[in-house]
């Protein structure tokens, strides 16, 4: 298997702590820092920050709804009929499932 020449360079700035950490990991793996980064390219998990913010916002809304339901149930114990509360809980469950699919 012939190795293709590498012709692209990526310049990345590191803090002193990040540089030392990368240097230590490369030494432990007995390879260069460049080889360490290249070897881990396929193992990187990309996170979408916008989606994470949207998920957090939606979870906060769901949390607020759960708190309102709990407050209502605690205030109106005699009126807290399961038939009234269950549809709200099912709607919350569906919203959570929709966020994770």
Image (spheres, rainbow, N blue to C red):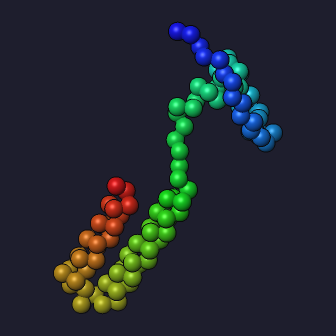
In percent of width and height, residue 10 lies at: 71, 34
Q: How many marks?
A: 0
Q: Nearer the viewer, residue 42 or 21?
A: 42
- At x 38% / y 61%, what residue is drawn? 99
- At x 81% / y 39%, what residue is drawn? 16
Which quarter of the picture shows residue 94?
bottom left
Which quarter of the picture shows residue 62?
bottom left
User: In the shown orientation, is residue 70 left or right of residue 17?
Assistant: left
In the figure, 93 relative to 85: above or below? above
In the figure, 21 relative to 77: above or below? above
- At x 62% / y 27%, what residue is drawn? 38
The quadrant of the image that shows the C terminus is bottom left
In percent of width and height, residue 89 lies at: 28, 73
Is residue 82 shown to the viewer in this render? yes
In the figure, 68 relative to 50: above or below? below
- At x 39% / y 82%, what residue is drawn? 68
Is residue 25 shown to the viewer in this render? no
In the figure, 81 relative to 97: above or below? below
In percent of width and height, residue 23 lies at: 74, 28
User: In the shown orientation, is residue 78 left or right of residue 41?
Assistant: left
Which quarter of the picture shows residue 76?
bottom left
Q: Nearer the viewer, residue 79 or 36?
A: 36
Q: Residue furthest top?
A: 1
């Amino acid at each position: 298997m012939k190795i293709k020449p590498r012709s692209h360079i990526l310049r990345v700035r590191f803090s002193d702590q990040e540089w030392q950490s990368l240097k230590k990991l490369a030494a432990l793996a007995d390879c260069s820092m460049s080889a360490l980064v290249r070897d881990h390219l396929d193992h990187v998990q990309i996170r979408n920050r916008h989606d994470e913010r949207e998920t957090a916002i939606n979870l906060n809304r769901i949390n607020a709804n759960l708190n309102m339901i709990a407050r209502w149930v605690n205030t109106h114990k005699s009126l807290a009929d399961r038939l009234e509360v269950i549809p709200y809980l099912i709607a919350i469950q569906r919203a959570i499932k929709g966020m994770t699919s």
